[in-house]
Amino acid sequence: MHKFGIELPKSVVEARHIDKKNGNSLWEDVIRKEMKAVQVAFKLLDDGERAPPTYQQIRCYMIFDVKMDTFQRTARYVAQGNMTEAPATLTYASVVSHESVRIALTLAALNDLEVKTADVANAFLQVPVLEKIWTICGPEFGPDEGRKAILVRALYGLCSASAAFRNHMADCMDNLGFKLCLADQHLWYRPATRKYDGHDYMEYVLLYVDDILVVSHDGMTILDKIDRFFPMKPDSKGDPDMYLGAKLRPVTLPNGVISWSLSPSKYVQEAVRNLKEYLLREYDGRTLVQRGSGVYVKDY
């Protein structure tokens, strides 16, 4: 299986085989990085120790992907959530709607406000797990392969992971004085006053999984306060570049008002560039074009 011309492994063993074939360690590097981050989610049991009888066994595995904006390889260690029976009240968690994002950007333009974004680092791993789960460690655990472990954090893939993170985020926003929007469970607001002209308005915080978007006259201060509760990825706080999978950029209208646009242009350009590289890559001494595939690079 390929994505953007890059071969995607289906397991840790296959990922290491691809690295060996390509003469690099690109997949191995992201595996080690991910396992270093998720170690906090597991409590290893002693040899011969059994998991408590009330705990459910679950399978955990690695998912591999390629980022659509940079085509960087990524790995995510997840739980097979369909193996557990969690109460429905613990599992449901949506994401902020596209309409809410567009309305927030419109309000930013109308009120001459800043738009800032940030990514929460290992979002689900920062909150306690709501289910009683145990698993058997796989080859990604190195010398601990085969040992039993109890999950103590909300690992990606668990039925309750999104709800657990969203609930903790709601507590954080309440602590900062924000109120939940009844029309969108992932949007918070609070009254604010712009200091330099005394203009009263509402500032907003939107959450799309672990991507935060802030609309305010002082967005960085809000992000810094949230960072105290949920540490964010280094260098992720600042002016927006990508959000909801599209390029987000300011546009100055003829009347001088700064508005915001969402465009898939960056994704399309990078996809085409990567496709060209894929078509020109040699397999057994010949490229796909030379094999007579009927696809011509110049057509792209």
Image: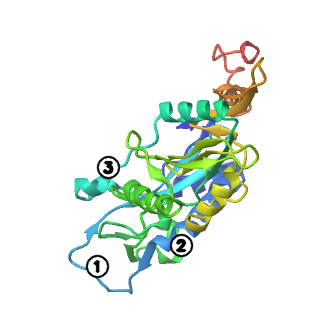
Figure check: 116 above or below 130: above
**SS state under label 2:** helix
Q: Earlier in the sequence, mark 3 or mark 2?
A: 3
Q: Position of residue 83 (x, y in %)?
A: 27, 57
Find the distance from the CA under tag 1 to the CA under tag 3: 27 Å
Figure check: 224 above or below 197: below
Indicate the amino acid at tag 1.
Answer: Ala
Q: Residue furthest front?
A: 198
Q: Earlier in the sequence, mark 2 or mark 1?
A: 1
Q: Which residue is mark 1?
A: 51
Left or right for 226, reference 87: right
Nearer to us: label 3 or label 2? 3
Observer-nearest residue: 281 or 174?
A: 174
Indicate the amino acid at tag 3.
Answer: Tyr
**Crowd band around label 1 with a 10 angstrom C-alpha radius: few (<14), some (14–19), many (20+):** some
Left or right for 42, reference 104: left
Q: Are marks 2 and 1 in contact (CB under 8 Å)?
A: no
* Image point (40%, 61%), residue name: 60
Q: Which residue is mark 3?
A: 92
Observer-nearest residue: 127 or 288?
A: 127
Q: Which residue is mark 2?
A: 142
Find the distance from the CA under tag 2 to the CA under tag 1: 21 Å
Figure check: 181 above or below 54: above
Nearer to us: label 1 or label 3? 3
Q: Position of residue 56 (x, y in %)?
A: 26, 68
**Crowd band around label 2 with a 10 angstrom C-alpha radius: few (<14), some (14–19), many (20+):** few
Q: Earlier in the sequence, mark 1 or mark 3?
A: 1
